[in-house]
Amino acid sequence: MDILTDLEQRGLIQQTTDDKGLRKQLEEKVVTLYCGFDPTADSLHIGHLVPALMLRRFQRAGHRPIALIGGGTGMIGDPSGRSTERQLNDEKTVQYFSDQIKLQLANILDFEKEENGAVARNNAEWLGQMTLIEFLRDTGKHFSINYMLAKDSVQSRLENGISFTEFTYMILQSYDFLNLFEKENCTLQIGGSDQWGNITAGMELIRRTRNDETAKVFGLTVPLITKADGTKFGKTAGGAVWLDPAKTSPYEFYQFWINTDDRDVIKFLKYFTFLELDEIADLEKELVTAPEKRVPHIRLAEEMTLLVHGEDALAQAQKISQALFSGDIKVLNGTEIEQGFKDVPTVEIAKEDKSLIELLVEAKISPSKRQAREDIQNGAIYINGDRQQELNYQLVQDDRIDDTFTIIRRGKKKYFLIRFK
Ligand SMILES: N[C@@H](Cc1ccc(O)cc1)C(=O)O
C-alpha cells in the first residue's frame, strides 16, 4: 500500500494542498519533507507524537524527513491555535529547550539510516543571522497585510489583540520552508491542523520567489486528536504527559495509554503505532468479544512505551503494574516504588524503631491509637502487601524497601507511602 493511502486509512490526514500531485511526487522520487517543533518547554509531550511519528512513517516509506527545531521561531511565538499572546523565553532557555527536544526527536527518527537518513536542523541558524532590513526587503515584501489578516491565526486574535511580533511569525515559518526548499530540496511540509495557515503561507512565498514549474511544493496536516468523552487529549490530573521520563515516568506513561477509553483505543492504535491495519482490525474484534481483557489497550501501552522509552523501561512499567495489581509489592525496588506510588499520600518519618500503632497514628493513616488498634485487629492493615494483625508489631529493617520505603495499605485500596529519612 502506498504511504498516502495508508495514512488516509489510519485517519491521519486532515488536509493536503494537492492530493493527486503529492501522490504522484511520492511515487516518483524520494521526497524530502519537514515538520517544525518550537522549543516552548524542556520536553515534547504526547501531542507532538503524531506529527513526529508522521515523519517516521514517511521515512519508513523511503522518504527523507527533516526535523526542524524552532530555535529562532521559538523566540517569537506562534499565534496559531492560541487565544492569547505567548510569554517570551530568553535565549538561554530557548537554547536549552532546543537541545532537549533534539535529543528526544533522535529517539523517534532514524538519523543513521544510509539512504534516507533523517536530518535535524535549527532555524536559529538562518533566522538568527538575518538583518531586519534584509527581512523586510526580501521576504516581507512578498506578503500583503490583507493576506496576513485573513489567516485564522490572526483573525481569531483580532478581538483580544496580537502583537506585531506574533503577527510576523507566519513570515518566519514561510521563510523556513523557502530556505529548506532551496537548500535541501524539501517539497513537503507537514504539521498539526493549526499549522495550515503557516504552511500555505510558505508555499505562497515559494511560488512568488520561484516562478518556475519545478517549484512544486505541498502541505499536509494531521487532525487534532479528540476523545470520545470530550475532554482534552494528552492531559491527566497531573498535567501534560511528557516524553521526558524525568517529567512523566515510564510507568505513568504506560498507565496513561492503558487507561484509554474503549471508544478511542482503536483510533489511537491507528494514529500512534506502526501496527498494520489488519492487525489492528484483529484487536478490534477482541475488543468486542472480550472487552474485559483490554487486549488493545495493553498492546497500545506496550507499543508506545517501547517506542518512547525503550525495552527496559517497558519491562519495568509492566513489573510495577503487575505488582500493584496483585498486591505483591515486595518485588519492587526503591525507584519502582517511587514511580508506582507517586500519587499516593506520602509521609516522611524518622528512621527509628516504631511500633505499628505509632506509625499508623504518626502517618495519619488511622486517626487515633484506638482506631489504629481496631484497624490492625480487623485485618485492615497491610505492610508491603502482607496483612499484619499482631497488635504489638514493631517495624523492622526488613519492612523497609531499599532501606527507605514502606507501603502501608488500609482496607481494600487506600495506599500510603512511608519514606524513612
Ligand atoms: N509553528 C510550529 C512550529 C514550526 C516552526 C518553524 C517551522 O518552519 C515550522 C513549524 C508550531 O508551533 O507547532
Image (tube, rainbow, N blue to C red):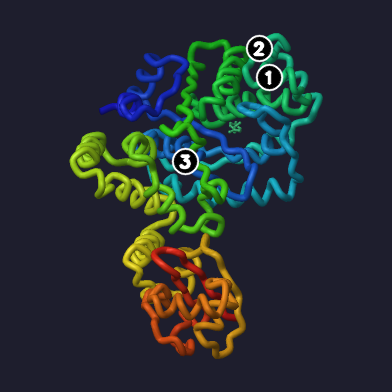
Tag 2 residue: 150
Graded by Cα atoms within 10 Å as few (under 14), some (14 to 19) or many (20 or more), the crowding at tag 2 reads few
Look at the picture and state if 250 lies above or below 79.
Answer: below
Compute the Cα span from label 2 to label 1.
7 Å
The dot on residue 172 is none
Look at the picture and state if 128 lies above or below 17.
Answer: below
**Are the residues at dot 2 and dot 1 in contact (C-beta closer than 8 Å)?**
yes
Judged left or right of residue 200, residue 384 is left
Q: What amino acid type is highlighted by mark number 3? A: Leu
Tag 3 residue: 49
Q: Quadrant of ligand 1?
A: top right
Judged left or right of residue 211, residue 226 is left
The residue located at (55%, 90%) in the rendering is 353
Can the viewer see residue 298 in this picture? yes
Q: What amino acid type is highlighted by mark number 2? A: Ala
Label 1 residue near ligand 1, CB within 8 Å: no
> Which one is in front, 126 or 319?
319
Graded by Cα atoms within 10 Å as few (under 14), some (14 to 19) or many (20 or more), the crowding at tag 1 reads many
Based on the displayed image, in which of its 4 quarters is residue 317 positioned? bottom left
